[in-house]
Amino acid sequence: MRKLILLGLIVCIAFLGWMKHFAAQPLNLPDTPHDLVLKHGSSLRGIAQQLVAEKVLSEPWSFIFLVRAYGMAGAVKAGNYQLEQGMTAYDLFQMITDGNTVQRSITFIEGWTFKQMREALNANESVRHVSMHLTDTEILAQIGAKETLPEGLFFPDSYYFSSGLTDLDILKRAYQTMQRKLDIAWRLRDAGLPYETPYQALTMASIVEKETGRSDERPLIARVFMNRLRLGMRLQTDPTVIYGMGDQFDGNLRKKDLQTDTPYNTYTRAGLPPTPIAMPGLAAIEAVLHPVNSDALYFVGKGDGSHAFSATLSAHNRAVVHYQLKRN
């Protein structure tokens, strides 16, 4: 019995010595820095085997024993981790149980449609995809939105997150951000605007967003469309026609397209389209709610990204000849 006890003590001492050596030994990383992605639901054994497959560890069992010895087998957190040269196995153990992840990001661009948002989310490998098979309406219900159509409801920005966050979580954050910013902007709006609801202002902002990329022109573009609304003129804006054409748009807008009626054709229908046509940024929203003073009703591209504005049709026609026909 004494011999067995002595043998057990020798084995324990040897095991503890090996574990101390293993824990303090620098990892032989295959590259520096090494990106380690731990997925949700991964077991400790699966993580250890992943570390071996990525050549971070030479065998899995020592790491498994190390984590279990500290009673932290259930504390490993999913996410993106960045391993640096000189890290030890103990450093790695602490990193993945403390959840010291590297944040990932996704950027939604001003002027994107909801379809483009979903494509960006689906292509991002750091996002946990749970909405790929949901309809747009089902997504809105999942994130608690009261609207039934998603276009324009999400704020364009860069969103940072740890690996494994769901696409619905990101969409909910973008939706809530837009609701918050739109609510503040609406409460601080100029008096006398022809918009009855924040949603109408959001729809107009999406048109302004698509009409120009120049921040200095947005308040004047917004004024032109506001002037047209007040006079009962049709908005006659190409981006709404293009949006209404959907996948049929091939990059060229033809005269017959302007004459083909859809709910979004502002050449054939008066007033605002039924929904926004893209994600407007905050600058476009502010431009719609704080337009400059002007009697302009028309504008035409100069060919350099800017526009010439006119208050009368005759002046507009002269500008078209000057900036478009002569240049062509």
Image: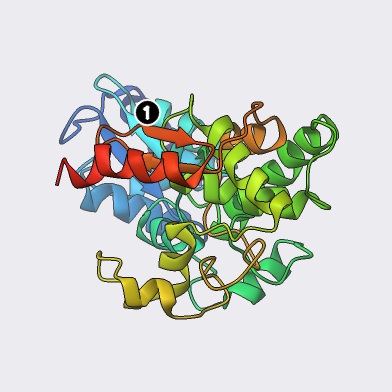
Q: Position of residue 155 (x, y in %)?
A: 59, 44
For the point 79% across and 65% down, the residue is 146
Seen from the viewer's position, the closer of residues 184 and 60 is 184
Q: Quadrant of residue 71?
A: top right
- Quick one: label 1, few (<14), some, or many (20+) residues within 10 Å? some
Whether residue 3 is visible to the viewer of this picture, yes or no, is no
> To which residue does mark 1 refer?
23
Front residue of this view, candidates 165 and 206:
206
Residue 139 position by quadrant: bottom right
Q: Nearer the viewer, residue 95 or 285?
A: 285
Colouring mode (rainbow / by chain / secondary structure / one colour): rainbow
Query: Circle 1 sits in a helix, a strand or a loop, which is it?
Result: helix
Label tally: 1
Point 44% across, 55% down: residue: 39
Q: Amino acid at mark 1?
A: Ala
Q: Is residue 153 left or right of residue 237?
A: right
Front-most of residues 280 and 195: 195
Tell me what residue is drawn at x 24 percent, y 22 percent.
Answer: 85
What residue do we see at 65% from left, 75% from top? 137
Residue 91: % across, % down: 41, 26
The spot of residue 231 in percent (x, y) is 70, 52
Q: In the picture provided, is 90 more to the left or to the right than 98?
A: left
Residue most extreme to the front:
314
In this rendering, would 91 be left or right of 294?
left
Whether residue 31 is visible here, answered yes or no, is: yes
Q: Is residue 204 above or below residue 190?
A: below
Q: Position of residue 79 (x, y in %)?
A: 47, 44
